Amino acid sequence: MNGKRVEMSRKILVAGGLAGLVAVIAVAGWLWDRQLGRAVPGLYHSNGRLELTRIDVAVKYPGRIGALDAQEGDAVTQGQILAREDDSEARAQLAAAIARQGQAEAATGRARAELAARTQAARLAGDELAHARTMRRQMLVSDMEVTQRQTALDVAERVRDGAAEAVQEAGRAVDAAAAMVTQARTAVDDMVIHAPVGGRIEYRVVEAGSVLPAGGRLYSLLDPVDPYLTVFFPARVVRQVRVGDEARIVFDDLETGAVAARISYISPEAQFTPKYVETATEREQLVYRVRLRVERTAQKDLGGLLKAGMTGEGYVRTDASAPWPAGPGGARRAAP
């Protein structure tokens, strides 16, 4: 009786061991498939992180920040007001420039009136000279009279020419004053800081009341229309692809499947794989940095789902006939 129980126990242990072995093999296979993916000739992938173009929003002129109208994480449109500087000094300079423009215009009016008077005087001197010559032919006046009238005409003409130059100079002064007004008005307008492009505020650098120098940063703005995934491939893969080739991205946190992309950049020099990519052994190998830029149509379809720092798998093909993956897996990981 005891022998039968021992035999039964052995069978149970053997069966349990076999079941455990099958489970281990299944888990190992799943992990292997997850790590390497199905072997698809000509299709390689590498994990990376999504990056967005960062734009520093800064002040053009030094001054005190009066108000900040955007918070971290806010979505902004192109031209939207983000901040305002104290513009009291700039407005005072604008008022002074407008006053100088008025003075220049008044001076131009006086110069034109002087020119008109000098022109009339030169015309009168010319008429008197002509009359004196007529009388000299009739022997009614002496040569001295004709000479005096000629001298008077010469002086009047020189004075007239000087008045004409004064008008031109006054006109240039008006132009300079107008330019100063435009510059001062531009400075006042630039005290209101607008978003250069539509995007999302990543973080705010200063607070209201801060005094900034020229070029002082206010915000870091993420441009959502220029997202790209940075991945790393060994030379044997990079040698077979080029900038402009099609690519695909499968994001870990999105259920959208493979996202259309293109290779926008391939580093001309090899480097060691960053620590956050692959295993410690693979980090010792040299790879090339590759950027996969999300296609514009895909950007529109995804809307605001793409965010900086998202992880995913970037796929490239060395064989144009290789099928793109529909989701995670489906390619050979490009091991060095």
Image (spheres, rainbow, N blue to C red):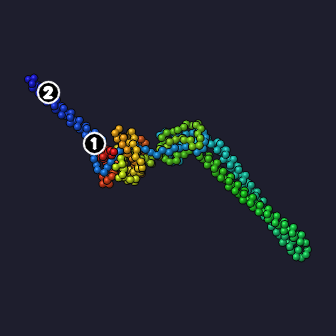
Give x and y (percent) for residue 315. Answer: 35, 48
Residue at image coords 70%, 49%: 99
Residue at image coords 58%, 39%: 212
Disc 1 marks which residue?
Answer: 33
Task: Say which quadrant the C terminus sits in.
Answer: top left
Residue 178 vs residue 163: left or right?
left
Q: Few, some or many C-alpha atoms within 10 Å of disc 2 (few <14, some 14-19, many ≥20)? A: few
Instruction: State the residue in front, 301 or 128.
Output: 128
Residue 53 vs residue 134: left or right?
left
Residue 33 drawn above or below residue 170? above
Disc 2 marks which residue?
Answer: 9
Would you identify the image quadrant in which residue 128 lies? bottom right
Instruction: State the residue in front, 98 or 246.
Output: 246
Residue 323 vs residue 133: left or right?
left
Query: Can residue 255 be seen at all in this image of the molecule?
Result: yes
Q: Amino acid at mark 2?
A: Ser
In the picture, the disc for residue 195 is none
Distance between the Cα atoms at labels 1 and 2? Answer: 36 Å
